[in-house]
Structures are given as C-alpha cells and as structure tokens.
Amino acid sequence: MASFNITFSNVLLTLLYLVPGFLLCKFRKVKAEHLSTASVILLYVCGPGLFLNALVSLDESPEMTGRMGLFLVFALAGELLLMLIILLLLGKKRRENFSLRMLSVASVMGNVGFFGMPVVRAVFPSAPEVAVYSCVFNVALNLISWTIAVFTLTGEKKYISLRAALINPSVIAAAVGFVLYLLHAKNWLPTLLQDGFRSLGNMSTPLCMVILGIRLATMDFKSLFTTPLVWLISAGKLLVFPLFCYLLVLPFPLDPVFKGAILILAATPCASILLGLAEIHHSGQELAANCALLSTLLSVLTIPLLSLLI
C-alpha cells in the first residue's frame, strides 16, 4: 500500500502542473501558438539536462553498464512485440484505416522521460539507476518511433529516418551522458556544472505538463472523452503495455528494481512524439493529441494501481 500512496501522490503532483497552463490559456495570458517556443525549450534545453543529470550522477560499474544494455533490449522487445501482436490481430483492416495503425503505435509509445522519470524516482528513492533506465527507455522510444512506427503509420519507407532516430536532443544527451558516466564524470566534473544539469532537469516535468495544460485548454472536451478509439488506445498504453512488459521480464532472474522500473515506465501516458508522427502522415493529429491528454489524466489511477504489483 505504501507504493500505491507514494505513486499516487507523485502522479497527482505531476498532473497538477497541468493547471497553470490550462488557466493561463483560458484567461488568454498565453496562446496555443506559444506552444512551439515552449516545446523547443523543453526539447533542446531542459530535456538534455534531465538525461545528463541522471547519467552523470551515477557511479560507473560493469554491472550497471550491463543492466543498462539489458534494459534497452527489454524496452525494444516490449515495444516491437506488442506492436506486432496488435497489427496481426487487426489483420488486413489496418491497411485502409489510419486510426487502427495509430492504435498499434500509440499503445507502446510513452512519456518515459519527462513524466516517467520523477515517478519512478519517487517509487525507488534509494535506487538512482532508475533515472538512467528512464533515459534508456527514451532511447528505445526514439529508435522505434522514427523507423518501425513511422513506417507502420505511413506505409512509406521514405519516411524512415535513422538520422532522426539518432540525431535528436534526447539521444545525443543520453550518448554524451553515457560517455561521461564511463569516464567517472561524477568525480571530476565541476559541481557548478552538475548543479546546472540538475536544475535544468528539474524544470522538465513542470514545463512539459504546463504545455499539455495549454493544449488541454484548446481541446474539444466532447471529442476527448467520447471517442471510443481514444479510450481503447489509452487502455492499451496504460494497462496492456505495462503488464506485457512486466510479464516479459518476470521469468528472468533480475532484481525487483529492474522489474519495477520497466513496469512503471511502460505505464506512462502516450508520448507527444505521436503528434509529430501524425503530422508526417497529415492525418490523425487530433487523435494523437487526445490520446496523449486522456491517457495523462487517467494515469493518476492506473500507475498507482500497477505499482501494487511491485
């Protein structure tokens, strides 16, 4: 029950950051057009700080490095296998229906960084490696998004981009952070610089949620809460995918922190990267936005309930 209370309070706190953005937009202090600027700051400044801080603050060891690699393998396997299963279940119907293809992709794409990292840290306060697992899961997300996922949505190989999968702020920050981790940067990197990474990282979750709050204020609530497919995708992302990933790691002799971290991170709401993938297809932007918002709101109940399995 302690894990439920801790998870519930931290997810609720994260969701409360939606309120300022929602109110600022409703009272016309900010406009939806401002989102692009705030999103750039989040992606290019705060996000890299979040990942660099997680990796630099960790003590290097061969065992930890091995667990990072193993976590990447399980994250990739979980995403690919469930996506494939959903596509097989949908059969030929998915070829003519973009929404069904979105179902297969959105069910495995989660906000494992900005949303997932603070929650998993709260659940495992004495295990700093869980923040790094969040970084690793985010790398897996980017690799899948710009290869298999974009091809699934568009059916066009020309949209597959290894450059986009590897050359983006999150993956670059994770790569630089990993090198610093291997070089034991925690012991020699100036404290002022490490504090800077920490400060930028701490801004990430509030800013991400404020942006979602602004977007929520511009949404049609009727379509948000009355579209069956949005509820189906949210259920897939918040319940089916985390349970699938947890069952995937359960038979292996891995420590409880590893298994618990993959469960919590897999249970995070739909990722905003879905909007970018929908933009490429020039279709489904509203569906992607609704999935991100509804799954975020519902996660205040689903993540604490899943934490009872840990």
Image (cartoon, rainbow, N blue to C red):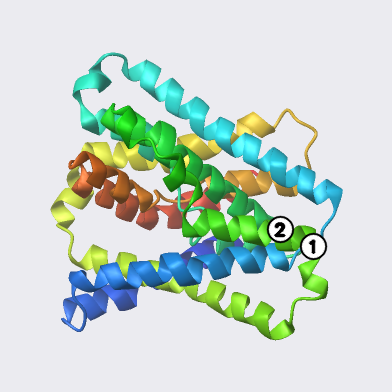
Rendered image quadrant of residue 103: top left
Q: Position of residue 191 (x, y in %)?
A: 73, 83
Label ID, residue 183? 1
Q: Please say whether residue 244 is visible from this viewpoint.
A: no
Q: Please say whether residue 302 is visible from this viewpoint.
A: yes
**Could you tell whether 297 is left or right of 180 in the image?**
left
Q: Position of residue 10 (x, y in %)?
A: 54, 66
Q: Position of residue 295 (x, y in %)?
A: 36, 50
**Depth check, front residue: 163 or 117:** 163
Secondary structure found at label 1:
loop
Residue wearing tag 2: 179
Disc 2: CA contacts within 10 A as few (<14), some (14-19) or many (>=20)? some
Residue shown at the point (46%, 40%) measured from the top left = 162
Residue shown at the point (50%, 66%) measured from the top left = 47
Q: 150 above or below 267?
A: above
Secondary structure found at label 2:
helix
**Depth check, front residue: 181 or 63:** 181
